[in-house]
Amino acid sequence: MSEKNRNLKSAGFDVIKTFEGYEFGDIQIPNAISIEELKAGAFIDRLENLILYGPVGTGKSHMATAIGVAACSRGKKVKFYRTATLVNLLSEAKAKGELQRFMKQLQKTDLLVCDEWGYVPFEKDGSQLLFQVISECYEKRSVIITTNLEFSKWNGIFYDEN
């Protein structure tokens, strides 16, 4: 099995999608990054992050997957999770006493994709584990988050007792 195929398999994509035929017409991309840089995943080499925000059906998950697939082709290690699934896996790992092992697996990645961020609210433990993962990534690996939730409402993702 080639490195590319190994990377694709271990990434855990729901469906393999590429940029072939992808429509950028309805997508707004900041002036600081070009479509070519986005496709090439240049932000991954710079340990930067990407938030893909917009209504359901605008191609956020497709774009995140296509960036991840392209990164796998370039030898990058990628992990793709629906955010709710990641939180469930973290909670299960913690309950089994295997959280450190799971976190070490995540630390080996170059790119972590959290799809459907904010679609499901989390319990306190789950939100703390998710926060731990995201903060652990800071300046060590890139994260792509896809969401239809505007940033001002993100505080609802991370449990707040007040």
Image (tube, rainbow, N blue to C red):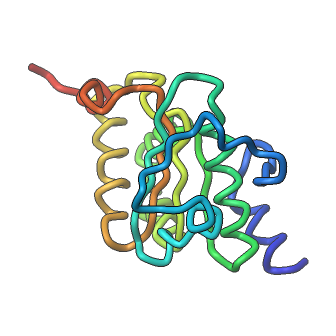
| Rendered-image quadrant of the C terminus | top left
> Is residue 41 positioned above or below 31 on the image?
below
Front residue (pair 116, 59): 59
Relative to 81, does residue 156 appear above or below in the rendering?
above
Front one among 117 and 162: 117
Residue 92 is at least partly visible in this image: no
Question: Is 158 left or right of 97, judged from the image as shown?
Answer: left
Q: Residue at x 36, y 36 (%)?
A: 126
Q: From the top left corner, tell me how far across and down residue 66 is, in percent.
A: 71, 54
Q: Residue at x 46, y 70 (%)?
A: 107
Q: Is residue 106 left or right of residue 36?
A: left
Residue 83, how many percent across, how many down?
A: 50, 38
Is residue 114 visible from the viewing direction of this image?
yes
Q: Residue at left 29%, top 30%?
A: 154
Q: Position of residue 99 (x, y in %)?
A: 42, 56
Q: Going by the image, does 108 lie left or right of 125? A: right
Quadrant in the picture for residue 9: bottom right
Quadrant in the picture for residue 11: bottom right
Between 74 and 99, the residue placed more toward the observer is 74
Give the residue at the far right of this rendering.
1
